[in-house]
Image: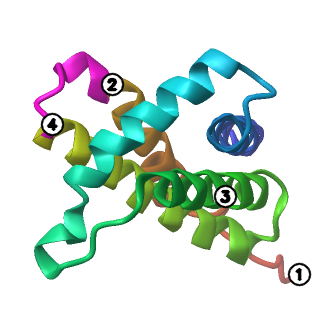
Amino acid sequence: MAAAFTALRVLLGLFFLLTGVAKLSDQLSAELHRHMKSQFVRFAEVFPLKEFGFVPEPGRYLEVVGWVEVVAGLLLAFGPQLLQEISNFVLSVIMIGAIYTLLVLREPLAMCAPATLCLGLLLLLNIRGHAAPTKPKFE
């Protein structure tokens, strides 16, 4: 079972790495990058901290989210355990923010599905716990 969770962690980390790269560069898909740029204009308008006077510039918002996904995805996939756990938390917060944003924008629920699935998988990795230490056998 541990191998399945390791595979899930690595695949999820690589997924976030790729989505981050797609936000930062048009090398993977120019069309997807353009779409992300236009979406982040809308996302900045409903940024959760807007009520406190913080409204990010859309291009900068896209870059920050992209870099966070790249770094956290790499650490989730290949980092030491502590950094995997921190990355899991950071990516969970990003996914909660994505779901919040899509709901506030009144997007169809199907648009929330990818972020919801990612959040669910991150939470699964988080709550599954770590393998219980084996008890030493005393003879």
The answer to whether 70 is drawn above or below residue 121 in the figure is below
Distance in Å between CA atoms under marks 4 and 3: 24 Å
Distance in Å between CA atoms under marks 4 and 1: 64 Å
Q: Earlier in the sequence, mark 2 or mark 1?
A: 2
Residue under numbered circle 4: 105
Do the numbered discs 3 and 1 sit on residues whose CB atoms are within 8 Å?
Answer: no
Q: Furthest-right residue in view?
A: 139
Q: Disc 3 residue type?
A: Trp
Q: Residue 49, position in %: x, y?
A: 22, 71
Q: How many labels, in total?
A: 4
Distance in Å between CA atoms under marks 3 and 1: 52 Å
Residue depth check, mark 2 versus mark 3: number of the one nearer the observer: 3
Q: Which residues are magenta?
A: 105-112
Near mark 2 (Cα within 10 A), the count class, few <14, some 14-19 or many ≥20, is: few
Q: Disc 1 residue type?
A: Glu
Q: Residue 38, position in %: x, y?
A: 42, 32
Do the numbered discs 2 and 1 sit on residues whose CB atoms are within 8 Å?
Answer: no
Near mark 3 (Cα within 10 A), the count class, few <14, some 14-19 or many ≥20, is: some
Visible residue check, residue 80: yes
Q: Which residue does the image show at 73% across and 29% down from the upper left?
A: 26
Do the numbered discs 4 and 1 sit on residues whose CB atoms are within 8 Å?
Answer: no
Q: Earlier in the sequence, mark 4 or mark 3?
A: 3
Q: Earlier in the sequence, mark 2 or mark 4?
A: 4
Distance in Å between CA atoms under marks 2 and 4: 15 Å
Say whether residue 51 is left or right of residue 55: left
The answer to whether 79 is drawn above or below residue 20 in the figure is below
Residue under numbered circle 3: 67
Q: Disc 4 residue type?
A: Leu
